[in-house]
């Protein structure tokens, strides 16, 4: 099969390479449609899925949504369940440890694809600030 490099595909890749936000297809569509108003969401999905199947980009599921990443170098992802942001984690030691120490019967681990789920420091700080404000408000109303 002949691989086509359409204008749509090039604009999608251009956008993915310009961002570290790990966008969903809908977010890619919102950005690319600014340059190509006639592009459809189904065209964006089709191109993203083809690009992922061909190894041009990474597709991964987190928070019940597919996210896309143009950085195909070896890395993992960190997902904040509060603000929904996805960050890159370039730490080969973690993957090497798991690959070397995984004890799965009748199976040899050759690679890993990890997604760490938790809260980013901004969301933790925001929660702590909100808790402090609530405590201060409670003290004022108690007086």
Image: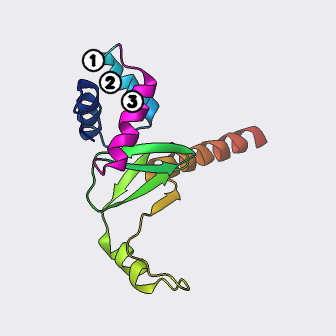
Q: Is residue 127 left or right of residue 113?
A: right
Task: Give the mark nearest the N terminus, 2 or 3.
Answer: 2
Using a 10 Å C-alpha cutoff, classify the residue at mark 1 as few (fewer than 14 neighbours), some (14 to 19) or many (20 or more).
few
Q: Are marks 2 and 3 in contact (CB under 8 Å)?
A: yes
Mark 1 or 3, nearer chain start: 1
Q: Which residue is mark 3?
A: 44
Residue 124 in the image, given as x and y percentages of width and height: 51, 52
Q: Nearer the viewer, mark 1 or mark 3?
A: 3
Residue 60 is situated, as x and y percent measured from the top left of the image, at 45, 51
Q: Which residue is mark 1?
A: 35
Residue in the image at 41% along x and 34% along y: 46
> In the structure shown, which secondary structural element does the residue marked by tag 3 occupy?
helix
Give the overall secondary structure of the magenta segment. helix
Residue range corresponding to the magenta coloring: 38-56
Q: Please say whether residue 49 is one of the residues in the magenta stretch.
A: yes
Report if the CB atoms under discs 1 and 3 are less than 8 Å apart.
no
């Amino acid at each position: 099969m002949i691989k086509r490099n359409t204008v749509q595909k090039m604009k999608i890749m251009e956008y993915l390479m310009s961002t570290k936000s790990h966008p969903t297809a809908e977010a890619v569509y919102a950005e690319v449609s600014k340059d190509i108003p006639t592009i459809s969401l189904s065209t964006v999905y089709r191109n993203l899925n083809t690009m992922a199947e061909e190894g041009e980009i990474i597709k991964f599921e987190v928070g019940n949504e597919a996210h896309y990443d143009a950085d195909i170098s070896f890395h993992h992802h960190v997902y904040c369940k509060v603000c929904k942001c996805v960050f890159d984690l370039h730490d080969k030691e973690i993957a090497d440890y798991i690959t070397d120490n995984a004890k799965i019967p009748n199976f040899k681990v050759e690679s890993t694809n990890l997604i760490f789920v938790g809260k980013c420091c901004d969301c933790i700080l925001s929660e702590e600030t909100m808790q402090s404000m609530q405590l201060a408000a409670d003290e004022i109303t108690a007086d």
